[in-house]
Image: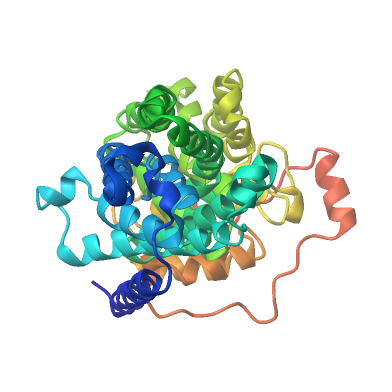
Amino acid sequence: MTRSLKLYIAGVVASSAFALIATTLLFPIDPALGAGFLVLGPAAPIAGLAFWTILTLLASAMPVRMPRGTLVGVAIAPQLAASFLGGPTAAAWVSLIGATEVRELRGRIPWYGTLANHAGITLPAVIAGLVMRSIPPEARTSSRFETFVVALLAAIVYVALNILLGASLAALRTNQPIRSVVLGDARGSARNLFGLTPIGWLMAQMYVFAWWASLLFAIPLYTTRRSYQDYTEIREMFTQTITALAGAVDKRDPFTSKHSWNVKAIAGDIGRELRLGEADLEALEWGGLLHDVGKIGVPDAVLLKAERLTKDERMSMNSHPVLGAEIIAPVTRLSRELPIIRNHHEWYNGSGYPDRLIGDEIPLLARVLHVADAFEAMTAARPYRMTPLTPEQALGELRKFAGIQFDPQIVDAFVRTKWVEGVPDPGRATPPRPIPLIAQHAAQMGGETPADTGVTPAR
């Protein structure tokens, strides 16, 4: 566990413990929490606290892990209901105890992980309960609309803090940017969590009339939880299908085993250094896996040839980006990946293929993948070069051809990744290599053949 993760957990746990103690001492449980058990007299609020704690325990039993590592469930509904009825103290204790998961009881989570998870739920619940307490007691029964608006504000506070704390923990644990985790997991889960807010409010309203009526909402809670599960399963299945397709392409050539997987990993790290959004990172992930899918249409005699390719063979090899884009085009879900697949062999100076794009005309994600693809190809054995380049040599080639073949800013971002950690960096060439003049670009667009220079293209 890193030092930053230790400090984060300690800070969140300490803040949550202080909030729990202070709230318990300052804010007694609202009698409304016992409305469903008035026959029990003074013990009614305690019975209500136990009721909502048990519901939260059941709702917390089976959380769903989102793609970037955060866990989501449907426990927010009974937690918010307890907050609406009993105030911050009820919200704190229901969240603290009710957030217990089966995997915690089975010892699958270390003690500090359990503390962090519970603190990340209890602290937002306390603050949300304080927001709810801003409603005067007389308004809670006389103005249903006002209570709903404040309940919605409390839910926004709860969800925002819960997502931020959970995403921060996941980011520090998995060494991902917090922004990436928040945008990746929280954007989708936040919509569903906010959708649970009216359910929690309705559960509280029904509870006042009859405690058992709140149990009727078990069905929408279960279906919401299933929607989380279905989303993650469908996405995982889609990723596995793409991975299998990329693996089938790589297996045609024994020298390119795991090539697409490695390119995906390198491109993703470059994207994170560039602070790209979640949609772009996902496009790099799937585009990296599928960038060479067009090689399905390249004959083995060309794909596996150890000698220098003839002009016709080079044309056949160079057709694979277009073939790949044509193969993927019918899959509308992969529309963001099409430019990556088609243009990952474009050169920054306009000498690449298939469209001879120049500079910023080349899609950003294609420029990222070009650097990742070239580095992986240079540091692995190939039929035309059995001795791989060392990382230092490969980095030197990337620096040498930055501004000619590669976008210099993308190379700068790559240098900051783990793939060349500790490797001496020769730095940018001086003076910077300019992209071609407009006249040269016009000549290329008119059909002139680009010079055969630069790093050997990945095959």
| Total marks placed | 0
Q: Quadrant of residue 343?
A: top right
Q: Residue at x 74, y 46 (%)?
A: 357
Residue 415 lies, in percent from the top left, at 48, 71
Q: Quadrant of residue 355?
A: top right
| Residue 285 seen anywhere in this rendered image of the structure | yes
Q: Would you say 120 lies left or right of 57 here?
A: right
Q: In this orientation, which residue lies closer to the viewer: 222 or 47?
A: 47
Which quadrant holds the N terminus?
bottom left
| Residue 352 seen anywhere in this rendered image of the structure | no
Q: Residue at x 55, y 56 (%)?
A: 132
Q: Would you say 9 lies left or right of 319 here?
A: left
Q: In this orientation, which residue lies closer to the viewer: 326 or 197?
A: 197
Q: How is the image coloured?
A: rainbow
Q: In this orientation, which residue lies closer to the viewer: 350 or 79?
A: 79
Residue 149 lies, in percent from the top left, at 66, 47
